[in-house]
Amino acid sequence: MKWQTQCEIAYIKVVPFIRSALIKKLVEKGMPLRKASKSVGLSITSYEKHVNDKNLQLLEKNDDINDMIDALANRIYSGEKIDPITFCIICSNSRKILGLTPCNL
């Protein structure tokens, strides 16, 4: 069995869905897809792969996660500096919804 940190697991199983949700919100706010993709650090191909996935739908249906993602998207859209811990908090809460053990922040 390979040892992995919680963040390594999340990078594969959680982060792409959070980034896809952010891109979706940015596009809804009027940001072009290419710019949104570049701002969030996820390719358009990966976004298109994840945008209709059930995991993304689970995150969007959760009011708390959806509000956190919306707030982060607003800050990205307005060009504000983003504290990395903001993303970590969203990730940790998303892990619970996606059936993974939350990390200890």
Image: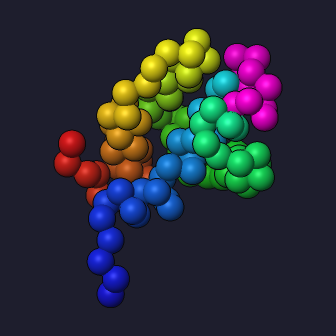
Q: Give the residue displayed 74% in from the left and 30% down from the top.
A: 35
Is residue 33 within the magenta segment? Answer: yes
Magenta part mainly helix, strand or loop?
helix
- Indicate the position of residue 28 as horizontal and vertical percent values: 72, 22
Q: Give the residue displayed 35% in from the left and 40% down from the top.
A: 88
Quadrant assignment for the N terminus? bottom left
Q: Give the residue displayed 38% in from the left and 50% down from the top.
A: 95
Is residue 52 within the magenta segment? Answer: no
Q: Which quadrant of the figure has residue 2?
A: bottom left
Query: Residue 91 or 60: which is nearer the viewer?
Result: 91
Residue at the far left in the pictured view: 104
7 to 70, vertically: above or below:
below
103 to 34, vertically: above or below:
below
Q: Which quadrant of the figure has residue 5?
A: bottom left
Q: Give the residue displayed 78% in from the left and 35% down from the top.
A: 34
* Residue range corresponding to the magenta coloring: 27-36
- Indicate the position of residue 84 as horizontal and vertical percent values: 37, 34
Q: How many marks?
A: 0
48 to 69, vertically: above or below:
below
Residue at the far top in the pictured view: 78
In this orientation, does residue 63 appear?
A: no
Describe residue 70's horizontal placement relative to residue 96 as left or right.
Answer: right
In this orientation, does residue 50 appear?
A: yes
- Indicate the position of residue 24 as horizontal and vertical percent values: 68, 32
- Indicate the position of residue 78 as horizontal and vertical percent values: 58, 12
Quadrant assignment for the C terminus? top left
